[in-house]
Image (spheres, rainbow, N blue to C red):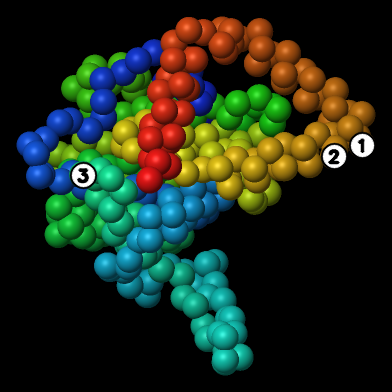
Amino acid sequence: MNSFEGDTTEPGAGPERERFLQPVADGQRVTVMLAAFEGWNDAGEAASDSLRYLNKLWGGKKVASIDADEYYDFQFTRPTVRRNAAGERKIKWPSTRIYKASAPDSNVDVIFVQGTEPSYKWRAYTAELLVHAEALNVDYVVLVGALLADVPHSRPIPVSTSSDDAPLRERMNLEASQYEGPVGIVGVLSEVALLAGLPTVSLWAAVPHYVAQAPSPKAQLALLHRIEELLQVPLDTHELAEEADAWERGVDELATEDPEIAAYVRQLEEAKDTADLPEATGESIAREFERYLKRRGQDRP
């Protein structure tokens, strides 16, 4: 996928929206499924890495998995062999793993779906995922992807937010994706979840195409900021922010070593700066300050 349609949001920018998660009665919990898949939908592995980061941060516990034999071509998605702490060899098979975690100090439970895009039977695969979603009482679905785009590494990573759910789009001031062409498993799952009556949004981070290799911590961070806004739960991303800064400095150094790349990056920067409104609007500052206050409140004893 190389289109970047929908509502494009940079961290701390964009119009104020109604919340994705609707209020519930005191004592009632809300369950959100977050799904990302390695492969075609995951430039720089930014999508899958962002969910791995969050799953680890919140101590997710494995609650289910999907059998690999039905859905994967092992000549294309090969198993890997590794050694455990005792030095014994162990084969790890491609699979889809489902974890459950609770967001701290909130009424939000999260179901993480992590795996590789399947090779076969996508309709059966997504149907099986929805069976698990029903069993785990999922109320909302957030699909996370990353694509290669003509964006500079030195500017905020854009995150596109879209939905095919018309009432949800209107409520959240979103746009429908105008993309037409081949789709990955994320697009298929989006349609199936919507048909099942689950409010569903898709997030896509734009990864600079000239630094497409993994990891891509700056894109991960942008996705996590958007997830933070959707779930209304403060995230501890200090460690990842440091990695993103180091990544950007490293790309800066590489770009200066090649005059052609340096000129191309300047061209992208100029195009981005011309197209964008000033970043430091009053609204963006207010939203960033609100995020800071939430994190500070979380750190207090």
Picture quarter with the C terminus: top left
The answer to which quarter of the image holds residue 242 is top right
Q: Earlier in the sequence, mark 3 or mark 1?
A: 3
Picture coordinates of residue 123, whole percent (x, y): 28, 54
Q: Amino acid at mark 1?
A: Glu
Judged by depth in the image, the label closer to the viewer, 3 or 2, is: 3
92 on left or right of 211: left
- Residue count near mark 3 (Cα–Cα under 10 Å), binned few <14, some 14–19, many ≥20: some
Q: Is residue 255 visible?
A: yes
- Residue count near mark 1 (Cα–Cα under 10 Å), binned few <14, some 14–19, many ≥20: few
Q: CA distance from mark 2 to mark 1?
A: 5 Å
Question: Is there CB contact under 8 Å for labels 3 and 1?
Answer: no
Q: Which residue is mark 3?
A: 107
Q: Which residue is mark 2?
A: 254
Residue that appears at 42% across and 42% down: 299
Residue that appears at 58% across and 81% down: 81
Residue 257 has which mark?
A: 1
Q: Amino acid at mark 2?
A: Leu
As helix, strand or loop, the secondary structure at mark 2 comes to: helix
Please tell me which residue lies in front, 73 or 57: 57
Q: CA distance from mark 3 to mark 1?
A: 50 Å
